[in-house]
Amino acid sequence: MHEDVERILYSEEEIRAKVALTGKAISADYKGKDILLVGVLKGAVVFTSDLMRALDNDVNCEIGFITARSYGKSAVSGGKVDMDDIKRQLGCEIKGRHIIIAEDILDSGLTLDTIKKGFLKESPASLKICVLLDKKAARKADITPDYKCFDVENEFIVGYGLDYAERYRCLPYIGVLKKELYENAINTIK
């Protein structure tokens, strides 16, 4: 375990098993359909890649990535994204498509709610949200994922793509970051 991690919440094996189950659920819902799996960078890159590989062969999956910077070097999400920029990044038609947005963690929900509303304005055939982690205690927007792997408490989580100030993304597990490493950033915002 990394010295900056207080404790491991989910091991590499637990993550792999849960992502596989989530992939099976999506596959059942979209059997024989074409989907566009949209990963929200940077945090969801590992999750999105593993989720794509967990889909059954009878689901045709195109993949795209968008950047929606809401944290920066902060420990708290700002929830502001630029939808025009997101559409440019995606570079393909949204109208009439089955879209699944893959996100690493749903906490305040502000960023994901903005993304969802932006995508809905483009008239997709369907739009669903798939999250690795659901942090309900931090929710500020009225948004619920359609698919999720794990629930987490209101702690600062790192690993498996999730970071703090661009660190810890490469950890193969999901762990709780030691509070003393980020508490000054939270106190500065308040």
Image (tube, rainbow, N blue to C red):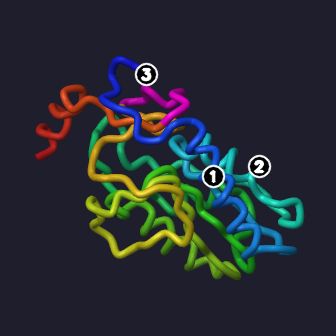
- Is 25 or 13 nearer to us in this picture? 13
Looking at the rendering, which quadrant does residue 151 occupy? bottom left
Q: Is residue 115 magenta?
A: no
Disc 3 element: loop
Q: Residues within 10 Å of mark 1 (few under 14, many from 20)?
A: many
Rendered location of residue 98, percent (x, y): 72, 74
Disc 2 element: helix
Label 3: which residue?
1
- Residue appearing at x 28%, y 40% in the figure: 75
Looking at the rendering, which quadrant does residue 140 occupy? bottom left
Label located before the other in sequence (1 or 3): 3
User: What count of labels does the image hold?
Assistant: 3
Relative placement, left or right, of 9 versus 14 is left
1 and 2 marks in contact (CB < 8 Å): no
Tell me how far mark 2 sits from mark 3, CA to CA: 27 Å
Circle number at residue 53: 2
Disc 1 element: helix
Label 1: which residue?
19
Label located before the other in sequence (1 or 2): 1
Amino acid on which the number 1 mark rests in the picture: Val
Tell me how far mark 1 sits from mark 2, CA to CA: 10 Å
Rendered location of residue 60, percent (x, y): 85, 64
Amino acid on which the number 2 mark rests in the picture: Arg
